[in-house]
Image: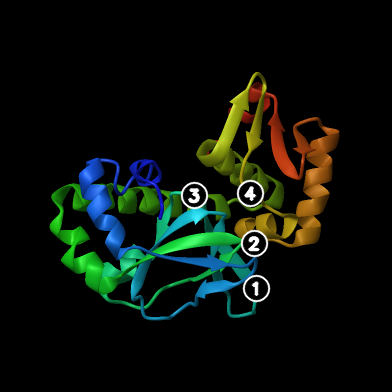
Amino acid sequence: MTSIDFFKRIPLFHNLTAAELQNLQAIFLEREYKKNQVIFIEEETGQYMYIVKYGEVKVLQTTPDGRENILAIHGPGDTFGELSLLDNETTPATVVAMEDCKIISISKQHFEAVLMKNAQVVESLLTILCRKLRDSWKTIQILKFNDAETRLKHVLMSLARVDGQWEADEVLISTKITHQDLAEIAGTSRETISRIISKLQTQKMLKIRAHKFVLVGHDRWKNVQP
């Protein structure tokens, strides 16, 4: 059973008491997914909302020419799938495990009968959806830049702001992300991303530490606004 402390850290539930969270655990189902396993597919009718317990997942859409664009990355404590439960529409994206992970699901029945009857949960849900809307707007703004290097810099800075560990003049991006993932977010090819990363490394603006990206020099990145 997942600990109460874990759920208190989730924005959707942080206003609830320990007793309320204890009662809610009866509606949670846990399932493990392997790396690259699909959690649900685009245009699937949503019957669950999900919470990432550990690991990371990516939300992606496939373009008419077969390319995959990453719309978002969710890590521990993040929720997804709730929009389909609210409007009864099909899911507009596919969600895939980026690494081995454990996902908690809540059925539509329990979502409506339990969560939506709690005013504090509803208030938190509205805040979460507003944040996701703003994140989507930022992604659209990033893709408006004509050159791939500018788009990549904005993607890296966005990841740093959401999941960065700031120390001295560097920020470590905790999200485990590959060149291909970055290409799918920035709307370009993996080869182009690899070339730009090499350039940023030569310019000493970027380092790779334990397979994670590190932005170097606050003054050189501060003007990159996602």
- Check disc 2 and report the residue beneath it: 184
Q: Which residue is mark 4?
A: 151
Q: Nearer the viewer, residue 144 or 19?
A: 19
Residue 67: mark in rendering: 1
Of labels 4 and 2, earlier in sequence is 4
Q: Residues within 10 Å of mark 3 (few under 14, many from 20)?
A: some
Query: CA gap, disc 2 to disc 1?
Result: 8 Å
Q: CA distance from mark 3 to mark 1?
A: 27 Å
Q: Nearer the viewer, residue 225 or 185?
A: 185
Q: Is residue 50 left or right of residue 175?
A: left
Residue drawn at point x = 15 percent, y = 54 percent: 118
Q: Nearer the viewer, mark 4 or mark 2?
A: 2
Tag 4: Cα neighbours inside 10 Å, few (<14), some, or many (≥20)? many
Residue type (three-letter) at the residue carrying disc 3: Pro
3D distance between C-alphas at marks 2 and 3: 22 Å
Q: Where residue 165 appears, x then y in whole percent? A: 59, 31
Q: In the rendered view of the protein, which quadrant contains the N terminus?
A: bottom left
Is residue 17 something that shows in the picture? yes
Contact (Cβ within 8 Å) of mark 2 with mark 1: yes
Q: Looking at the image, which residue sits at the far top?
A: 168
Is label 2 in contact with label 3 (beta carbons under 8 Å)? no
Q: Earlier in the sequence, mark 2 or mark 3?
A: 3
Residue 184 placement: quadrant: bottom right
* Mark 4 to mark 2 CA distance (whole Å): 11 Å
